[in-house]
Image (tube, grey):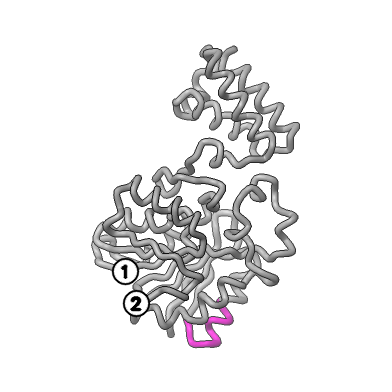
């Protein structure tokens, strides 16, 4: 069967299963199967797909029909121009988190020597991206989950950053020592009651990385409450949050002496809080 007809069948199956972005997912899966780029797939619709590759593609397509995230099937996710290893033990890196990294990075000189901490590191994507952008700096990558830290370790070694990224298992600040130029985090922020309404794909991701407690602030609240004690003078706190959470958090920080700004994401959602001590 050629590429075009195989994709048509795949898209129809994914649409029938209620999959998110069926066309894009079918293209990415076929590109991964063939070991080519998505651009190649789009430009070579008449190319014949070998029988063995067809069989492999059908197996992966069945997993996608069942709601499994694309990143779990192929094992990686692009993030800030890097390939990040992803498993069911970590949250799949998303474009919004790339924006968080870019916003935070814009506050620092790329040639400077800094100490950053990535709280709730998960796959380590933020830590790896920051270490890549700031070659003279170090990053402490913190997570409560031992399983997530194993995935982060894989990514750190894959990008040869083990000399500049240190991993630490800690429930927020429990085991953290020192002060930092940047505290950055994409913490669990979805209110518990909203978890059942998530898409099938998101439900495959670890609950620990999603569940923000009754009001969505169960991790963010203690993170912010003690953050000033871990920031160097002039240091920056940068957070990604759920829709509707950014301004309440910014106002709360202002009440305890922070100067906080709220930034929108690419979907025009007020998602990010950037704060410094006033």
Residue 125 forms part of the magenta stretch: no
In the displayed structure, 235 sits above or below 134; it is below
Q: Nearer the viewer, residue 121 or 77?
A: 121
Residue 46 in sight in this render? no
- Image-based side of 57 in relation to 278, left or right: right
Q: Residue, x 50% and y 73% (percent of image)?
A: 261
Our reading of the magenta stretch's main secondary structure is: helix
In the displayed structure, 179 sits above or below 195; it is below
Q: Residue, x 43% and y 57% (percent of image)?
A: 126
Q: Where is residue 159 in the image (x, y as percent from the top left)?
A: 33, 47
Residue receiving disc 2: 178
Q: Nearer the viewer, residue 199 or 90?
A: 90
- Name the outermost residue toward the front: 146
- Counting every numbered tag in the picture gives 2
Q: Residue, x 55% and y 87% (percent of image)?
A: 255
Q: Are marks 1 and 2 in contact (CB under 8 Å)?
A: yes
Q: What stretch is highlighted in magenta?
A: 250-258
- Image-based side of 157 in relation to 3, left or right: left
Mark 1 vs mark 2, CA separation in Å: 10 Å
1 or 2: mark nearer the eye? 2
* Disc 1 element: strand
Mark 1 Cα-neighbour bin, 10 Å: few <14, some 14–19, many ≥20: many
Residue receiving disc 1: 115
Among numbered discs 1 and 2, the one appearing first in the sequence: 1
Image quarter of residue 70 = top right
Quadrant including the C terminus: bottom left
Q: Residue, x 33% and y 57% (percent of image)?
A: 131
Q: Where is residue 228 in the image (x, y as percent from the top left)?
A: 43, 82
Residue 170 in sight in this render? yes
């Amino acid at each position: 069967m050629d590429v075009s007809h195989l994709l048509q069948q795949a898209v129809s199956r994914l649409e029938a299963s209620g999959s998110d972005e069926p066309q894009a997912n079918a293209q990415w899966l076929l590109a991964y199967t063939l070991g080519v780029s998505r651009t190649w797939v789009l430009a070579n619709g008449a190319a014949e797909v070998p029988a063995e590759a067809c069989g492999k593609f059908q197996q992966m397509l069945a997993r996608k029909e069942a709601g499994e995230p694309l990143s779990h099937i192929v094992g990686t996710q692009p993030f800030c121009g890097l390939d990040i290893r992803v498993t069911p033990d970590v949250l799949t890196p998303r474009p919004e988190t790339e924006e968080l990294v870019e916003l935070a990075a814009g506050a620092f000189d790329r040639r400077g020597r800094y100490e950053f901490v990535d709280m709730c590191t998960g796959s380590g994507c933020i830590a790896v991206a920051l270490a890549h952008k700031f070659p003279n700096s170090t990053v402490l990558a913190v997570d409560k989950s031992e399983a997530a830290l194993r995935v982060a370790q894989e990514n750190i070694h894959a990008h040869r950053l083990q000399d500049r990224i240190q991993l630490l298992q800690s429930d927020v600040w429990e085991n953290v020592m020192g002060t930092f130029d940047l505290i950055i985090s994409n913490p669990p922020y979805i209110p518990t009651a909203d978890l059942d309404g998530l898409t099938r794909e998101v439900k495959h991701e670890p609950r620990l990385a999603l569940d923000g407690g009754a009001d969505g602030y169960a991790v963010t609240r203690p993170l912010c409450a003690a953050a000033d004690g871990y920031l160097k003078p002039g240091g920056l706190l940068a957070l990604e949050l759920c829709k509707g959470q950014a301004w309440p958090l910014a106002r709360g920080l202002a009440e305890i002496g922070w100067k906080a700004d709220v930034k929108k994401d690419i979907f025009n959602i007020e998602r990010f809080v950037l704060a410094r001590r006033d």
